[in-house]
Image (cartoon, coloured by chain):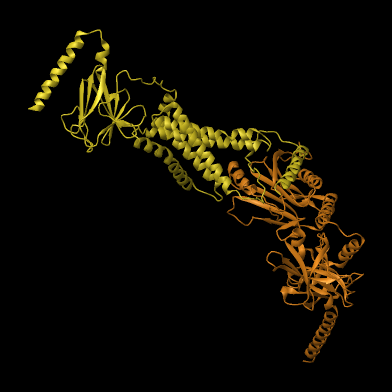
Chain colours: A yellow, B orange
Amino acid sequence: MEVGMEVTHHSDDRATEIAPTTAMENDNLSLEQGEIIIEEISRNHKLLHRHKFNLNEISIGRNYHNDIILTDPHICPKHLSLTYSQGLWRLNDNNSVNGTLLQHNQEKRQDAHQQVINDGDVITLGKSQLRVLFSDHQISDTIALSPFESLIDFIRHPIAVFMSLALFMLIAGNISYLNQQVETNISQLFVSAFSMSLLFSLWPAGVALVSHLTKNEPRVLAQFGISFVFFILMWFSDLLEEIVVFNSASNSVLGLFIALIPIFLAFGLLWLNSYIGFHMSAKRRIVVAISITALLFGGTYLLQYSKKREFNPHPNYNATIMAPVFLIAPSNSVDDFIKQSNNLFEQASKAALEED
Amino acid sequence: MKTFFTLVFVLFSSTAFAAEQAEEIFAQLTPSLYQIKLIDKASGEKSSIGSGFQISSDGIIATNYHVISSYARHPEKYRIEYLDHQGKMAEVELVSVDVINDLALVKRQVEEGMPYFQLSDQKPIKGEKLFALGNPHDLGMIVVPGTYNGLKKESFNERIHFTGSINSGMSGGPVVNKSEKVVGINVATSGNQIGFLVPHDKLVKLFNDYNKKAPIDIKQQMAEQLLANQNKLMQALLNNNWQNKELAGKAMIPIIEVPFIRCWGDSNADKTDALILAAIANCSLDENTYLSSHFFTGSVEIEFRFMQAKNLSDNKFYHLYQQQIARAGAGNRAGKNDVSEYQCHHDLVTPSSTANTGKAINNKSIFCTRAYKDFPGLFDVLYLGASVDKNQQALVSHFTLAGVSQENAMAFTGRFMEAVSWK
């Protein structure tokens, strides 16, 4: 009976509430402030549900009479209510077992009873969290669609993905053909190319899985397409580096320059992987891509450095040679070679003194 | 039956005679024979042993350089001691070395004039009976009869070929003739009764030089000897004829016409499943200079490798070819304390001697060098030339020189590079 009374009272209240506002048509403020948005969020502040009300009292709890019904067992049946008066929303805790906490702007949580609620405040009740927003809440600017979008659309087309996979396998097959010391047949090459592409598929598959697990859209085809295009590009950059090293003398700076290409490619791949798979700000995306690239190349360098012996009794020279078709640079004369090699003696003598 | 007896008798009498002679020699000379020990100061235990013999009344003892090499390289870590026939021990001082001929002179304290070995003033004749003395494997002083077989053929630094057992520990012991005069010093063995001796005239020279002017610093003395020896060796290599020779009918390679550089050949023509046909010629100096157990120098290695693809694409041929040249190493052993790390330079080079002719070759040339730490001005060098101008053929030209001066190394490299071409 009491409940029924409540409801009638409630509707009465609403009627009286509406009456003055309709009377004061010009006073938009009071009308708009009656609006409230309550977001159910997860512990790491991910949005689960969003409710929008235009009331002056909102009840929250576990029983089915509430405006927002929460299933968390640590919440009381009639846990709390929010009331609107004089342009402000207040929080009333109905003597709940576990209490209610309010957090404003990343400040420390405090007891929420009878507190005024501001835009962006987070209410903690039981093990659940609610975020309160008002309709004038500041939102970030619209992000324009990146030009990559059309490129990604092209690359994720099944035919394009198939083509890049096929090209990848062709290259992998060719590499294993070049490395075989004895004669080989096509099926052996195919098996090694296939296993190579399976191995490399782990990367896009992994990224898609992670983005699926983090409630993002996996976009498997796009991840595959992009990853394999970059794997192919990396092989081409290897080839380019080989050609440059083959054609240049050891004191050339071009070789150093070329060595940076794989780093840029890795960065590009990671950036696009995160662009496709995860929603994050542009700045954060760049930071993530740079960090993983640095970890990858820095880690490889560290690994090599730690493996390096204290003293290497063998010469460490670059033996890159390629078939005559790749030979572009003109040859030097013996005299020039001798002249340049002469500098090594000074370097070696200096090194002998330093290492003492 | 009669002949058999005669034979046995003849044999018996000759061995009896030799044994008697050896015994006599041993008895007379033994007071001047020593075991030379290198004692590690920290542990107080011996780290190497050899033999030695006194050559002057005032206590100069001759031995091998390699017996006392650890001391010569690290005098702070070791001391040298002798052990005489009466079991007496005392410390000796290192006074001079000949690192090229593996000789060293140490000096013991003497109170009065002592008996010593006379150095012969003439060379033995081929077939002459000699007696090697020494203390093999720390078993005690022994005498080994053997035969003089002339100087080792085709050697750069002379060694006597002695037919008789020389064992480790006998190093540094004297080899005397019937009149008890020293004609050589035990130095090395090839097993099976083949032994090598340093001719006595090297010791005579070292001893005379020492008497004239004792060296101030052993390291300095070694550096001078190494520098002089590499000059002698490199001059011999550079001033002799370099004969142009065909390799596999496709390439021209230089063969240096000096007796002490010996060449060997090999090919894989019998391996039908090989993807690349390879013909290899390598030439090297058979001897090197011992500086310490982990540091050798004075070696020369030259290698040529011709390769022909069999049913291969150009790319695959070059891929396999690159694996062949990727791991060239030093020709001599040397460690962290002896040398710097290698410094390398590479470039594409066409020798002008054959440029613009049908023989012209375009090489990827790699040159590496490392410097000696204790002997400034000496370097190990390595050169590797890989032809990159033929689709299905390749020629690798490679050499290593150990312990040479920059000037000699570059003169050799220049001449070598110009001498390699296609046919």
Q: Quadrant of residue B115?
A: bottom right
Name the foreground residue: B213 vs B328: B213
Name the foreground residue: B361 vs A16: A16
Residue A115, percent from left and from top: 27, 26
Residue B92, percent from left and from top: 80, 67
Residue A355, percent from left and from top: 70, 48
Relative to A183, say whether B108 is above or below: below
Relative to B102, say whether B181 is above or below: below
Say left or right for A29 vs B47. Answer: left
Residue at figure coordinates x 67%, y 48% from the top left: A315
Residue at figure coordinates x 61%, y 43% from the top left: B318
Relative to B27, say whether A171 is above or below: above
Residue at figure coordinates x 62%, y 45% from the top left: B322
Residue A354 visible in image: yes
Question: Furthest residue to the bottom?
Answer: B2
Residue at figure coordinates x 85%, y 50% from the top left: B239
Q: Quadrant of residue B225?
A: bottom right
Name the foreground residue: B215 vs A319: B215
Name the quadrant of the N terminus of chain B: bottom right
Say left or right for A100 vs B281. Answer: left
Name the foreground residue: B371 vs B413: B371
**Total numbered labels:** 0
Say left or right for A278 vs A20. Answer: right
Relative to A326, say whether B188 is above or below: below
Name the quadrant of the C terminus of chain B: top right
Residue B288 visible in image: no
